Amino acid sequence: MLDHVTMHVQDLPRVLAFYKAALAPIGYTLAMEFPSAAGLGEGGKLDLWMAVTDKPLRPMHIAFRSDRQRVDAFHAAALAAGGTDNGAPGVRTDYHVHYYAAFVIDPEGNNIEVVCHDPPAAQKQPPARAAARRPAKKVRKPPRKPARKAAKVNKTKKRR
């Protein structure tokens, strides 16, 4: 299991502004910022880091798992933040029948994806009403009879 990923960038303020807006719909926020690095994550868990480099960039693909509604919201927010459309929200049956994703190219050329693997109807159901919940009746089983001991067999031969 991955713990975190570091993406190298050349224009940290620009990229940071993009990611703060693009990933807000999936719950990501900026949690740590230094002059040449920053960390984003959900619920205080920083798993996406950005670090400034002066070397040529090698674009990468990063995918974030979420639900379908947030896939749509990410795509809209990422485009509004200056990303380039690389695949509108939709099912990608080439991957599997429920692979619902959207893709955006960030300001530095990275392919960012938000994906949902659940079928459309796989939303959490509200709990049943308390009145409808009744404990199941206990079925009493008859007491178990002790096993019979096997009759001792006289293995000695009778003498004639």
Image (spheres, rainbow, N blue to C red):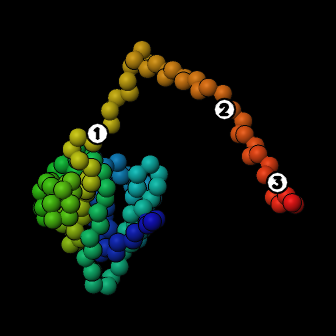
Q: Position of residue 65 (x, y in %)?
A: 31, 55
Q: CA distance from mark 2 to mark 3?
A: 30 Å
What amino acid does circle 2 point to? Arg
Residue highlighted by disc 3: 154
Asked whether the residues under the numbered discs 3 and 1 touch, taking CB atoms below 8 Å apart as contact, a structural biologist would say: no
Q: Position of residue 77 (x, y in %)?
A: 20, 51
The residue indicated by pointer 2 is 144
SS at circle 3: loop
**Residue 154 appears left or right of 53:** right
Q: For this view, does 138 lie left or right of residue 76?
A: right
Residue 1: mark? none
The image quarter containing residue 58 is: bottom left
Counting the numbered discs, the total is 3
Disc 1 crowd rating (10 Å Cα; few below 14, some 14-19, many 20+) is: few
Q: Is residue 152 visible?
A: yes
Image quadrant containing the C terminus: bottom right
Residues under numbered marks 2 and 1 in contact, where contact means CB atoms less than 8 Å apart: no
Q: Amino acid type of disc 3?
A: Asn
**Residue receiving disc 1:** 123
Which kind of residue does numbered mark 1 sit on?
A: Gln
Q: Along the polypeptide, which appears first: circle 3 or circle 1? A: 1
Quadrant housing residue 79: bottom left
